[in-house]
Image: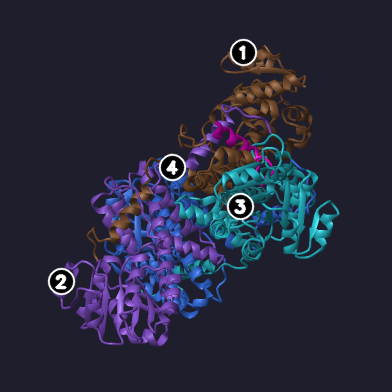
Chain colours: A brown, B cyan, C blue, D purple
Amino acid sequence: MEIGITGLGRMGAGMAERWLRNGHRVVAHNRSHEPIDALAAKGAEPAYSINELVEKLQAPRAVWIMLPAGDVTEQMILQLIPLLEPGDTIIDGGNTMYKDDMRRAEMLKQHGLNYIDQGTSGGVWGLENGFCIMVGGENELVSRLEPAFKTLAPPDGYVHCGPVGSGHFVKMVHNGIEYGMMQAYAEGFEIMRAKKEFNLNLYNISSAWRYGSVVRSWLLDLTVDAFKDDPDLTSQKGYVDDSGEGRWTIHAAMALDVPAPVITLSLFERFHSRQPESFAAKVLAAMRRGFGGHAVKKAQ
Amino acid sequence: MEIGITGLGRMGAGMAERWLRNGHRVVAHNRSHEPIDALAAKGAEPAYSINELVEKLQAPRAVWIMLPAGDVTEQMILQLIPLLEPGDTIIDGGNTMYKDDMRRAEMLKQHGLNYIDQGTSGGVWGLENGFCIMVGGENELVSRLEPAFKTLAPPDGYVHCGPVGSGHFVKMVHNGIEYGMMQAYAEGFEIMRAKKEFNLNLYNISSAWRYGSVVRSWLLDLTVDAFKDDPDLTSQKGYVDDSGEGRWTIHAAMALDVPAPVITLSLFERFHSRQPESFAAKVLAAMRRGFGGHAVKKAQ
Amino acid sequence: MEIGITGLGRMGAGMAERWLRNGHRVVAHNRSHEPIDALAAKGAEPAYSINELVEKLQAPRAVWIMLPAGDVTEQMILQLIPLLEPGDTIIDGGNTMYKDDMRRAEMLKQHGLNYIDQGTSGGVWGLENGFCIMVGGENELVSRLEPAFKTLAPPDGYVHCGPVGSGHFVKMVHNGIEYGMMQAYAEGFEIMRAKKEFNLNLYNISSAWRYGSVVRSWLLDLTVDAFKDDPDLTSQKGYVDDSGEGRWTIHAAMALDVPAPVITLSLFERFHSRQPESFAAKVLAAMRRGFGGHAVKKAQ
Amino acid sequence: MEIGITGLGRMGAGMAERWLRNGHRVVAHNRSHEPIDALAAKGAEPAYSINELVEKLQAPRAVWIMLPAGDVTEQMILQLIPLLEPGDTIIDGGNTMYKDDMRRAEMLKQHGLNYIDQGTSGGVWGLENGFCIMVGGENELVSRLEPAFKTLAPPDGYVHCGPVGSGHFVKMVHNGIEYGMMQAYAEGFEIMRAKKEFNLNLYNISSAWRYGSVVRSWLLDLTVDAFKDDPDLTSQKGYVDDSGEGRWTIHAAMALDVPAPVITLSLFERFHSRQPESFAAKVLAAMRRGFGGHAVKKAQ
């Protein structure tokens, strides 16, 4: 089928390449031009402006947006609205908050336009392995674009989750789970490393765990790679960012009255990693000093 | 090589069968006789008593114990001591606490006997997939028995972790990680299920996550199976046991001053699942009642 | 000074009574009339409508709103706007989200009206003990109304926290802390109760803790009252509500990248108390069943 | 009554002084001599050796041990055994693990000696305020020594909890609760401090909370003192020790299948405060790097 895409970062470029390999016609746009040319060399139709992107597609169009969540994506949608025709569809393949999806779908409907949210997992490995694709949108519309979704995914790696918003909701929860799994491994490896008397080689252990153990996973495979060249992670700084979807998962859990201790603690551990010193710890230490009576204290 | 084993439960029987398939001579003992006969039919040498087990092996002997951790295993070791000869080796393949391993190795050394601890992961799937084998013991001794360990594991699924105790220590931490991973998935699925408006099918979603997603894992594969016939888990009671290794992992974390919030909370969530009503919750509710002033209250 | 108030629930009525006892002129309004008459009997000027409330006050007016947070308070403010004159002030003494305060202050400024947020702690005990009063608003304005704030509080129990929103922000965090303290006690009492062999009397123990111990507090005083008549809390259901401020505190912590494990877990424990069965626990139990191989499982 | 005491640190000296003020006869021993002389100046009978301590007391003797838990206390008990006579009683007022109490009581019973465990709370403030005293031991024996216990405590601040071990068990849980309360405050203050736009003065706020608020407590009083001279805690290092009783409380919770998330997380936050860098955070960061594909990665 015919596919338009704007945003040729690593995820977007990987998606476009999978489409091309499978015989789809891809019109590719990006803010800077090099990624367009790189993809054109692989068979894509280049579009050096949004106008060109829209013009080179036949109605009803399907335009994928692969941009950072938030304002950048929102602005792109606002730019596209006047250029598109009723019946055209915008597919947001980024990490948008699901409530924004629901709001946007309503907004686009006013212009006769369709909206689909696509959660995309797999990172840079998706180009070769295929991406796990989680889609939210109306049945008929999603069915029509299914060939494009299925090409992105490995066999059985595509799921139509439900109405608009549900694709990003499921992807969001997926990321929350990812946080928890990562933290579980991280705690385990720290415990093993702290047990100095056993002098454990974490590369050897994690390598063996890949085969036959209950904790084998793709995240473990990544960890093995990390330990390979540096089993003590000497050169690795312990500073851990978060992309926002963990927070949203916790917001959702709270809104739904669901206890989510593991996902939440995983986020908080990342906060810790970014604090040179905790003010809470200062308060605790100051209180403890108070027990000793150094502070002047009036009896209650 | 020649291998003795006592304890032909599912794990033990699976191990013995893998040895037989790979041409080892296996002398097999069990308290009840049916499992012995079943294994004899597959080529094992039957031993209907501990004495027979020892007699049918040539020194230096290697005797695997695959029994429940704790007293049962301890009693078996005490029975074996007078029957074995200096240079013989006992391998504990169960879920023993690593400090017990260290104590036993000392005790056996008094009798000229050797001790190896083998952490074994993989459950009933190990027979076909191979078990992940984590071994603790002296280098020379472990090397001598390596053919037996390697036969149990899939290629690259065997690791000699370090000195006595380290095999079970690593297996223990492995189980702690497993708790955390399981709880991460469980929270995610509960959040998705609670989002009624999206009416998410957890079987479809978890199935797609197996392919290309960041959270794919063997535990996820198991979960998919669970959702297959019962996507709402209607017939499943939410009562979750724990086998003890999670607790030991937390003990170890505390002894080593390592924060392990995710592993610990995973255990506590299991405690919750087993409480019909929480006394802590009663205390909270009673306090809240106090705010309303129903209780007679003297000002501080 | 002269004070208007709408919302004569327990908190509002208690505040009004403290003002009256200290010689302020109070014009009191409520949706239903009985609380008005009850307060009039104690010296308040009754106002049976909002119009009457405004008319009976001299400009510049100060009108306290003591209503449930959210829509009810918002509607009252919208009703008051056309009735008030430039220079008048609305003080929201309820549990409003601080961002709503900031939005409202902007909105009221368009009409020349002032806004102050007042966090109020102390429950029904406030009438006798005084309320702890945490105020957010502009310096000059807050100073002008200080006699009213100070009358509500015990000596030294009033604080001007900062700009608009800060009063409710501080009160919100106060409630988050309260959750954590309550949960700390609740866990401790559950541990003691579970230690059957010591047969501990929680009333006796909590009573003694009130005097000289490190954990003495007003919340402990309340707990003692709860244990007094029912040391096993036999008649108490373990179902714990939450008023929303705990959630907001966690939202704030996340927005500020502050780890707040204790406050968050305290909320999640309340969620637990309200779930007859946890879906997460069902997922865990189903996974564990999978280890046993009962489910049909394809090797990865 | 007549009281012997060994261990005149701040707690021990404070206890002895309270006894003296109330007319008890106190024979006081310490390893170094200055504290003995200081107490003798206040009316105590000095004992410069254990022998002298025992000799100066009339049977049946009551000897309080106020030493650091663990080996030091154990050695003192072993020294006392041959010096004491059947019917004499040792009271351990330190922070002993309750299982050690139970073991020691058995051991002393072999020699006809009695044992009582006394949990003591209140820190250096106990001298003036009185200590909260939690006692475990046999009824008749505890009754006989009650005058000494009651003198230590403020009115109503003494409780006989139950059999041997229960006094220290209750004190241990008390400390676990203390950890949770402290962490609750610490999180709240960190959230407030992080809210830069409100520029909150934590000394002013915590001071006001002492009066009328729901979170008022003795620990809050200490915190106010800490903020008094240094509201930003600039000069305070955020390094928080723990004395061991928090860990024991968590061990007890796990042994009793009681979820104790808040107490446990409070301990883990202290661990965090003592780690310059977390290895777990390094693992997380390394995994995240893996998503980006920088590491060499074989597809699963």
- Relative to residue C246, is residue D54 drawn left or right? left
Q: Position of residue D138 (x, y in %)?
A: 42, 84
Q: Quadrant of the C terminus of chain C?
A: top right
CB of mark 1 within 8 Å of CB of mark 3? no
Q: Which chain is mark 2 on?
A: D
Q: Which residue is mark 3?
A: B117
Q: Position of residue C2 (x, y in %)?
A: 31, 59
Tell which of B151 and A185 is nearer to you: B151
- When the figure is inspected, residue B160 is found, relative to residue C93, above or below; the finding is above
Q: Which residue is mark 4?
A: C107
> Alpha-carbon distance for marks 1 and 3?
65 Å
Q: Tell me if I can see residue C2 in this picture.
A: no
Q: Quadrant of residue C54?
A: bottom left
Q: Which chain is mark 4 on?
A: C
Q: Which residue is mark 1?
A: A48
Question: Callout 3, which amino acid?
Answer: Asp
> Alpha-carbon distance for marks 4 and 2?
72 Å
Tell which of A97 and D233 is nearer to you: D233
Q: Nearer the viewer, mark 3 or mark 2?
A: 3
Q: Are marks 3 and 2 on the same chain?
A: no
Circle 2 crowding by C-alpha within 10 Å: few under 14, some 14–19, many from 20 = some
Q: Which residue is mark 2?
A: D37
